[in-house]
Amino acid sequence: MNVLYGLYQPDEGEILVDGKPLKLRGPSDAIAAGIGMVHQHFMLVPVFTVAENVMLGAEQVKGGIAGILDRRRARREVAEVSERYNLRVDPDAVIEDLPVGIQQRVEIVKALTRDVDLLILDEPTAVLTPQETEELLTVMRSLKAAGKSIVFITHKLGEVKAIADRITVIRRGKTVGTASPTASRDELAAKMVGRSVRLTVEKPPATPGRPILEVAGLVVDDDRQIRAVDGVDLTVRAGEVLGVAGVQGNGQTELIEAIMGLRPVLAGTVTLDGQPVHGWSTKKVLRAGVGYVPEDRSVDGLVKEFSVAENLVLDIYDRPPFGKGLSLKPDAIAKSAQERIEQFDVRTPSADAAVGTLSGGNQQKVIVARELSRPLKLFIAAQPTRGVDVGSIEFIHSRVIRERDEGTAVMVVSSELDEVINLADRIAVMYRGRVIGIVGPDTPREEIGLLMAGITPDAATEAAAPAADAATPAPEGPGSEDEA
Amino acid sequence: MSTMAVPDVAVAQVDEGFWTRTRKIGAVLLALGVLAAVLFGALATDQQARFTLSETEGGAALEIHGTVGAILFGVIAAAAGAALMAGVPKRWFTVLLGVGLVAFVLSFLCWQVSAAPEGRNFMPLVNIVRGTFILALPLIFGALAGVLCERSGVVNVAIEGQLLMGAFSGALFGSLSGSVWVGLVAAAIGGAFISLLLAVFAIRYLVDQVVMGIVLNLLAVGITGFLYERLMQTNAEKYNSAPRFSNWEIPLLRDIPVLGPALFRSNIFLYLGLLLVLVIHIALFRTRWGLRTRAVGEHPTAADTLGVKVLGLRYRNVLLAGVVAGIGGASYTLALYSFTKNMIGGKGFIALAALIFGRWSPTGALLAALFFGFADQLGTYLGAIGSSIPSQFLAMLPYLATMLAVAGLVGKVRAPAADGKPYIKG
Amino acid sequence: MNNPNPVSGSSDRDPVSGSPDRDPVSGSPDKDPATEAARVAAGGANRAAAVTAPKRPEPEARPSLGRLFLDNLWAANTVTVTVLAVLLAMFVGAVLIIVSDPDVLATYGYITARPLDALNASWTVVSEAYANLFKGAIFDPEASGFTAVLSPISETLTYTAPLVFTGLSVALAFRGGLFNIGAQGQATIGVILAALAGFLLPLPPVLHLIVALLAGAVGGALWGFIPGILKARAGAHEVINTIMLNYVAVYFLSWIIIQSGVQNPDRADAISKPVDSSAQFPRLLGGDLRVHAGILLAVLATWFVAWLLNRSTFGFELRAVGANPDAARTAGISVAKTYVLMMAIAGLLAGLGGSQMVLGSTANALTPLVVAQIGFDGILVALLGRVKPWGVLLAALLFGALQAGGNRMQSYSGISLELVTVLQALIVIFIAAPALVKAIFQLRAARAARLQTSLAKGW
């Protein structure tokens, strides 16, 4: 799509618009040809107002060569477009103060003021709540009614079926087929994946033991000092997997970062095997027997410039046998690395290769190998299989279950509902910084989906009550808190 | 990280409790005021502190009894601090802070001037104001060069080198041609030459911009020093005797008391510098070029997707910065002195400090430059009246102030988000 | 390799807004599906095979061993690039020498008539200058006698020693992800404390030297600690703070020199009392040659920094923080503590370097310019040495040699010492942009990205 928008140059082939071949040297050519794009990562200048963002690149100016901006006209244009398509955007709001859903609408306004005929939406729903998604679909329908063409890129089958008129499935850079929206989910999924995915994990029933991790009344802010975790209570027992489901950005990240000592706990307690650990440094938490797979491996999990061997001791380099006193023991590090590489089937040319040269799946296996190679009480894995190939997913899942069966308390946080359902013995659903419900893995998907959207079975009563303590989860299902 | 920012999510501000930033600053101001009233008051003498509205001792003057003045202004500063602590509407913050700081300085001056030996216990305001502006001038040009670069996302640590190169080529070509205007153009080109190197290496070859800036400063010191010794020292007549701009008096304005003689009987560089502050300020915040520059400095990818030529704009701005700094360098050699080795002597780095202290805005940079210039001028003045305050410590003031600013102790400074990050397409 | 899971696939791509994290060498493990999609949409051919391959295949036939050696030598390895950068810099230097010599320039006035005149004159002046540079730095074939023969080497090592320290200071911080522009200020505070200890404390030899060195080290460490703690606590950018502290140190030096008890009572200008001889480094080759034990200390320091970086737990932390502070923090490493300690050690090294300026043989008293430019030169040395300890030592040797040779060039050929500054700056510029050197010398494009020594970051 970036080629279509002129950001990258095609190596081969050509683009036809209205039957005529088009050579795009840059985005301005694309805009001139009537192509607009809403990027997955918004292309908005955070400190600018909506109007400034909209006029950037297509500024209306007065005053001849001085090029004084005609701000009034820009504001009026935003207001007009926003009105016409019912987008409700304030031209004078500053982008960084706006919620994600509105920012996305600003992107759409930006494209529409440029009179595009074709609008490309790249994974627009990845960051939206179900409600915002629904609004977006409505906007798309009204655009379609106004005669615009839309290319809607998504991996969510439900949305495709809800809005698309024609579906093209692309896998590994190739068109693998087209389908109509009436095609079944299974048919589409098969096309997308290429082979039938083994989605279930073989696992014996859990035998939960004593509570290992107990979180009570936890309150945490995110980087912008906005409340992200707002009174969470959780328990993870030895020998069970607690899955944490939820649309991304509902406080899951902040929750585990607070448990790991990476983020200040503003209120509440975190107890590990009976010992309060909130306020501890990350090192101390790790030392207490916690393994942690962070959700973004390239940012938080690995030092890409470091070798595989070094990454395998990233959090135990200063402990025997790898470090003694002030000095490192390279031989011990190398020897252990060799063992881990074999045990965890890490495909690497050598233990000295920089980890950044490995594939995503093998990078992830390095992290998992590192964290699972010391005795653990608690294992926290966030998005453990994101961007990982199928083979590695199966491997990582089986290791998670094996860890559980050895009596470790396991917490899996994933925005992929399937992953949570497959791994978890109990599922906690987070919504707006709270655990909105804890259910068993055999709960119907639809019900969990509703929870993720913030709708509890007793939604009516909750809506009426003030927000205060309404989100205390109503225990239900076989894996609830009451179970001993 | 990215919270699902649904509109009704409770926005929890950091709980600062009683000690908000305003209160902290107020407390500091209060302490300073009390200190001034007690300490300066005790040290001040019975002599009058005279602030003459001229360049000499004579003429009209504002006078105040030394001890009384020191205590009075100290109390005013303390009162402003107390008001800030007591909690005042936000719009009063800047005013009160300004009043407090000025009062503190006045209290200090009352002590210093009154304690000066008999016959020297006066402060000629015209001299002080003029000196402040003259000393601030290279800082203004330098900081504007910084604004142009950094607002479009290129860190400019090479201001020193740009100023030096401008001063040198202004002197050299001014001397060879015998024309100030040729010198001025040459100075602009000289500054742009350093900028060109910065632009090419930072933008084309992706060399770290701070590294490049530092190296370019050394290169400029080397080249100008080498050619100075080879050419200017051996034949100063031919190579280092540039003509100078004469002072232009501006009718009407020159008759304003204090400011008139101090500012409006100056050379072209002062007018040019002040004009540039205005022009760049308007251009940055009101024009298409400014909008694009700021966009490129904050989020180049976004600008690129809208068809803005990121690299082209950066090249242009960095070169423009060189032109501005080069002219700033010429404000030495085409108005005041002959060229000497390493004559900028760190002013480029104070300009950088002014840029940061002024929060990357042209007007902020102007105010910061004036503040630094005043500290500099005050040092000279205090030395002349035989003060016990070492001028070296006053000279440290700009640097210490900047450190406090970046540490977040004096408000938040935020650089353009993409400042220093090379833009790699795709 | 590729991502057959459409559900989780596309959320893993690099954020476009952040710094693009694309390694051109390593292939693309998580290929952006949208890009791939677009290729197809654009009618592109099937490139999936190329995408799945972990590395781009080298379309070259297997070369012979000799060919391979030449290729590797030529393929922009660091030594080649360094040598070429030095040559390029000297070429530019030669141009400067020529254009600044009125006599030679005059011959260019009639170059069309008698081109050989111009070339001869140019060659004479340039070759003489560079010959003196060589004679002053390494070996003078005309010299006779022990002292005269060793004198150039002695001078080179004398200038090398402090540069090793400041170079290591900058390199160490660089590896930890901070840019220490403050080696100059740290060296300044170091030299002040070392000098004060050197003439204020009445101590026996050896002990006096050790104490003076310690004083210098503590001074430098303090001056490094300040930006470190400001970075760790307030997130204040170390580049800004170290620049500011450089100047604070300069003014402090110019103040303290003229205080009574410090200023030399026999002098009216700004110069301190001389350091006691008991606090000075012993000279290694007798009194006539200036090389002193400081160079041995420099080698020791290089070894220490090499050990610290590569073989110590702190070095592991430092490198991890430097390469990816987020991952380091997640792995339980205290980034703040690492920054503070690292800057203090960097300052300590620079302080030791500064101390040599009064405890060695270049000077024995404080003057406003006593540390010369060793802090700024240290930045160049660190970059030239590819921020590796032993590389820094070699780079400092080169710079020391240029300095020593420059002195002779100045007195024998009348070429200003400033030319050395120009050469040093140019060498580093060419080093910093290997792509440019290669473009000039038509080197193979391979490994271009690997040579990027500097890390790019903003304020």
Image (cartoon, coloured by chain):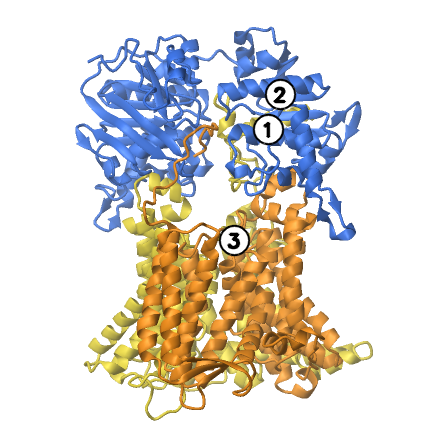
Please name the amino acid that badge 1 sits on. Arg
Say which of B149 and A2 sits in front. Answer: B149
- Please, what secondary structure does the residue beneath circle 1 have? helix
Q: Position of residue C256 (x, y in %)?
A: 35, 79
Quadrant hosting residue C122: bottom right
How many neighbours does mark 2 have within 10 angstroms: few (below 14), some (14-19), or many (20 or more)? some
Note whether residue C161 is visible: no
Q: Are marks 2 and 1 in contact (CB under 8 Å)?
A: yes
Which of the two marks, 3 or 2, is nearer to us in this view? 2
- Tell which chain the image draws in yellow: C
Apparent colour of chain B: orange
Q: Are marks 3 and 2 in contact (CB under 8 Å)?
A: no
N-terminal-most mark, 2 or 1: 1
* Chain letter for mark 3: C
> How many tags in the picture?
3
Screen quadrant of the C terminus of chain A: top left
Screen quadrant of the N terminus of chain A: top right
Say the numbered circle drawn on residue A105. Answer: 1
* Chain letter for mark 2: A
Q: Which residue is mark 3?
A: C77
Note whether residue B194 is visible: yes
Left or right: residue B319 compared with residue A268: right
Q: Position of residue C417 (x, y in %)?
A: 53, 78
C-alpha separation, residue under disc 1 versus residue under disc 3: 50 Å
Q: Which residue is mark 2?
A: A139
